[in-house]
Amino acid sequence: FGFRGVSSVESAAIGGAGHLVNFLGTDTMAALVLCKEYYHEPMAGFSIPASEHSTMTSWGKEKEVDAMRNMLEQYPTGIVACVSDSYDIFQACEKYWGTELKSMIEARDGFLVVRPDSGELPDIVIKVLKSLESKFGSSPTGTGHKLLPPCIRIIQGDGIDIDSLGVILQKMKDEGFAADNL
């Protein structure tokens, strides 16, 4: 999501390359090009299968759960991310992910990343965490923070910058949630 909030392709490339010093996940092609041209790194990062609003809403509201099931069936292993707020993020978390598709998620060799893409930060992240925790449970980390099971995580893409990230992480800490959930 680093390309969204910058002023140029060059900014995306530089910021994305900085991200790739510590992480392998990216969709910022400009960063991959920069790493190849200037650092001779043939493949500095990788993407994962991920839905977007158009791929979810094309199924229609009544078949949203079918679109979600399709993502799990098409990508039965590894990490898969699914935007889940096309209609109602909490119905998606509690009824679809947490009930109808829960056994599929728990049985996967990999994990599902639920993506709320709208709502007020940091509250939407906390509400989604609590919603998923109500269905999947959590376990305490070594520091006593709550961690969702390894089959499910969250990604917040919209509205993230250096300031909002700090606010989100502090709110998660205040609410007792581990940063590893995000």
Image (tube, rainbow, N blue to C red):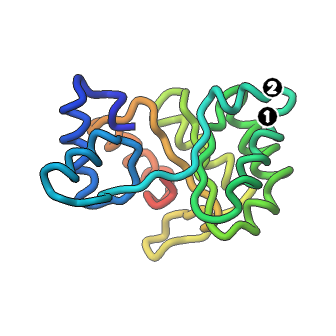
Front position in the image: 123 or 26: 26
Mark 2, secondary structure of its residue: helix
6 or 135: nearer the eye? 6
C-alpha separation, residue under disc 2 versus residue under disc 1: 5 Å
Quadrant in the picture for the N terminus: top left
- The mark found on residue 61 in the picture is 2
Query: Where is residue 73 drawn, in percent x and y?
Result: 76, 55
- Relative height, residue 180 to residue 38 (above, below): below
CB-based contact (under 8 Å), mark 2 and mark 1: yes
Q: Is residue 99 above or below residue 51?
A: below
The number of callouts visible is 2
- The residue carrying pointer 2 sits among few (fewer than 14), some (14 to 19) or many (20 or more) residues within 10 Å by Cα, namely some
Q: Which residue does the image show at 26% across and 27% down from the upper left?
A: 6
Q: Which residue is mark 1?
A: 64
Name the kind of residue labelled 1 in the image.
Glu
Tell whether 4 sits left or right of 22: right
The residue depicted at 13 percent of the width and 51 percent of the height is 38
